[in-house]
Image: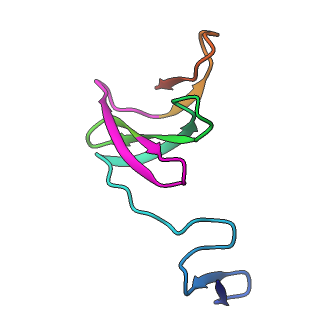
Amino acid sequence: MNVEKIGRDRFRPTATGAWPGFAAAQLVPIVGVGIEAVSLDLEADGDLHLAVLCQNPSVVNILRNNGAGVFANVFTIPLSLAPHAIARGNLNLGGQTDLVVT
């Protein structure tokens, strides 16, 4: 992996397309225009998945991590109102991660 300096505090990767310690960027098609995302372990397998909040249309895209850091859009949850924010946590103390959209 080579890194090229392109400014006083700016660098860009060359050759492999990835920064040290990070996988190469990947494009994952989603429905709508993403405005916010949270990571969460949906399957209790130790892999962090992504919930991407989108507008136009108002949806939440669930991107599953295959365990190797590669994501795929698994399903889309439609929303009835325009969303503003997304959060995660064990809100009902049930031991599983819950999603909240406002």
Is-magenta flag for residue 45?
no
Give residue 46's quadrant in the image: top right
**Vertical comparison of 54 with 20: above or below:** above
Residue at 52% from the left image edge and 29% from the top image edge: 43
Residue at 73% from the left image edge and 87% from the top image edge: 8
Residue at 49% from the left image edge and 42% from the top image edge: 50
* Magenta extent: 63-84
Looking at the image, what colour scheme do you see?
rainbow
Give residue 80's quadrant in the image: top left
Q: Residue lying furthest right in this view?
A: 8
Q: How many numbered discs?
A: 0
Question: Residue 65: percent from the left, percent from the top?
Answer: 49, 46
State left or right for residue 69 relative to residue 52: right
| Image quarter hosting the N terminus | bottom right
Is-magenta flag for residue 69?
yes
Question: Residue 91: percent from the left, percent from the top?
Answer: 60, 15
Foreground residue, 53 or 76?
76
Question: Residue 57: percent from the left, percent from the top?
Answer: 26, 40
